[in-house]
Amino acid sequence: MKTAAYCFQKLLGILITMFLVTVLTFLAFNLIPGDPAQLILGTEATPQSLAELHARLGLDKSLPVRYLSWLGGLLSGDMGISLQYSKPVSALIFERLPVTAWLAGLALVFILLLSFPAGVLSAKSSRSFLGRLLDSLTVLNLALPNFFIGILCIWVLGLVLHIFTPGAYVDYRQNFQGFLRYLIFPALAIALPNAAVIAKFLRTSILAEKNSGYVATAKSKGLSDNAILLKHVLKNALIPAITLFGMIIAEVFSGSILIEQVYSLPGIGRLLISAVNSRDFPLMESLVVYIAFLVTVANFAADLLKRAADPRMKSEP
């Protein structure tokens, strides 16, 4: 299949997926028992004030009309008004987005820098002390949840070594360099478990490829182990790792909820927790759609990377 046709097919799949996500999200939050107007006005609200607020929020209209109105708003950038903050939802998301985006970007850089070299080196030296040490460190990072690694970073790097000041978040609009310096440690806490997942996956994939017939053929032709690894094994072993990396990208960019809580970062993840606690339905609906959109786009990007890495996929119907 040609690349243009492949991209068109994938984009069509994204559109269908996002349509289904909006339908399910809207139905889920609008069929949950509870009156948003009552939540805003409190238990002492009069029937008249409730009716007026229902009309203002559009809650007096039928479900299909409300869905079409909400969907039209989403497509035009109007995501409604937050019940908790009394501000446009789009403004709240775009206000928090830079924090999560920079945090995710730094975390992804760490993941790339740590995972692929660790996975390759661990597989290459699987029977040596270094290989066993790297494999043990990988398992250790897999076993520890990211919020606990975040707490360890605060304790060791912040309270013991005084490399940074825990809780002293610097706003990016006031001091951008200070903002980036503060993000390094939460980004590291997000990166370590995810890098361990990719490193472990890549190690297993490389070791499996080493048992393939083409490796024995390459050895019989006199190629060195390093040449076989770099020219043949790594190319095939990277393909499943790219798929996994695409899924991790989506998870990281959707906001690491616990890490943002641990480090008091005003990002998307913390906004989602706040929306859930206050039953802020317009905000929750928009954040669910936002996260689903990131997941679908990240998977699309991963599919394109896999297609570029594996020419055999281009001949698939």
Image: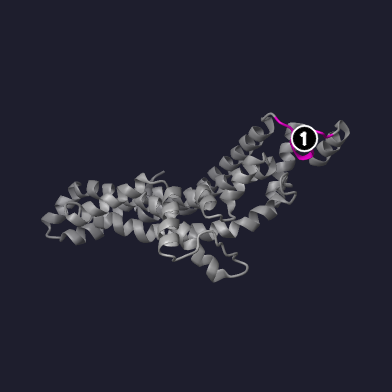
Q: Return the residue nearer the eye: 213 or 36.
A: 36
64 horizontally vs 209: left or right: right
User: Based on the displayed image, in which of its 4 quarters is residue 185 positioned?
Assistant: bottom left
- Residue type at the position of mark 1: Gln
35 horizontally vs 48: left or right: left
Inspect the magenta stretch and tell me whether residue 128 lies in it.
Answer: no
Residue annotated with mark 1: 38
61 horizontally vs 274: left or right: right
Residue drawn at the location 33% of the way across and 57% of the way down? 116
Q: Return the residue nearer the eye: 59 or 311.
A: 59
In the image, residue 31 sits, relative to residue 232, either above or below, namely above
Residue 275 in the image, given as x and y percentages of width and height = 64, 44
How packed mark 1 is, by other alpha carbons closer than 10 Å (few <14, some 14-19, many 20 or more), is: some
Count the marks: 1
Q: Identify the residue at the far front of this view.
A: 160
Residue 140 in the image, given as x and y percentages of width and height = 32, 48
Residue 206 in the image, given as x and y percentages of width and height = 25, 50
Q: Which residues are magenta?
A: 34-45
Residue drawn at the location 23% of the way across and 53% of the way down? 133
Residue 312 visible somewhere in the drawing: no
Residue 263 visible somewhere in the drawing: yes
User: Based on the displayed image, in which of its 4 quarters is residue 233 positioned?
Assistant: bottom left
Q: Secondary structure at mark 1?
A: helix
Residue 82 in the image, given as x and y percentages of width and height = 71, 46
Q: Return the residue nearer the eye: 298 or 193.
A: 193
- The C terminus, quarter of image: top left
